Image (cartoon, rainbow, N blue to C red):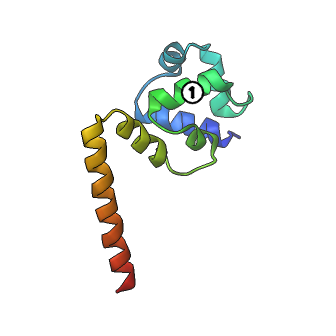
Amino acid sequence: MGTIIGKRIKQLREEKNITTIALAEIIGVERTSISKWETGARSNPTSTPLKKLSEYFGVSMDYLLGLSDERVDVNTTLMSIFNNLNVENKMSTIAYVKELEVKQNETKKS
């Protein structure tokens, strides 16, 4: 019986329609490692392949490990986008988010 991480790797791999061989080449491990993770015959990937899996599939490591059912870590994604903005756009974003917060709080009160 597979582990949560194994089931998720297999599901994500099948969604991308790639083989275990292709995935192994992409993240730099042996094909047998992918198969063994998917079936639960081997312990979880170490940190380097886990990070590469996360980046390749565009999901959080917490999702892969079964610590979260959310595929994307919203906070990390938002901070990554925010950090790439110039100062002017950062200030505009902060102002907009504050407006959203006010509207949300007003909605809660009604």
Q: Name the spot of residue 105 as percent of width and height, x first.
A: 38, 75
Query: Where is 30 relative to 96, above or below?
Result: above
- Callout 1: helix, strand or loop? helix
Disc 1: CA contacts within 10 A as few (<14), some (14-19) or many (>=20) = some
Query: Where is 74 relative to 55, above or below?
Result: below
Q: Name the spot of residue 67 as percent of width and height, x first.
A: 63, 48
Q: Quadrant of the C terminus?
A: bottom left
Q: Which residue is outermost to the bottom?
A: 110
For residue 35, side relative to residue 40 (left or right): left
Question: Which residue is pictured at 52% across the width and 31% down the height?
Answer: 54
How many numbered discs? 1
Q: In which quarter of the image is the N terminus?
A: top right
Question: Which residue is pictured at 43% across the width and 24% down the height?
Answer: 18
Q: Name the spot of residue 2 as percent of width and height, x first.
A: 68, 39
Question: Which residue is pictured at 74% across the width and 27% down the height?
Answer: 42
- Judging depth in this view, the residue of 2 and 49 nearest the camera is 49
- Judging depth in this view, the residue of 21 and 85 nearest the camera is 85
Which amino acid, by three-letter code, is at mark 1?
A: Lys
The answer to which quarter of the image holds residue 36 is: top right
Query: Where is 21 relative to 57, above or below?
Result: above
Q: Name the spot of residue 81 as percent of width and height, x first.
A: 36, 38
Question: Which residue is pictured at 58% across the width and 37% down the height?
Answer: 61
Residue tagged by mark 1?
Answer: 51
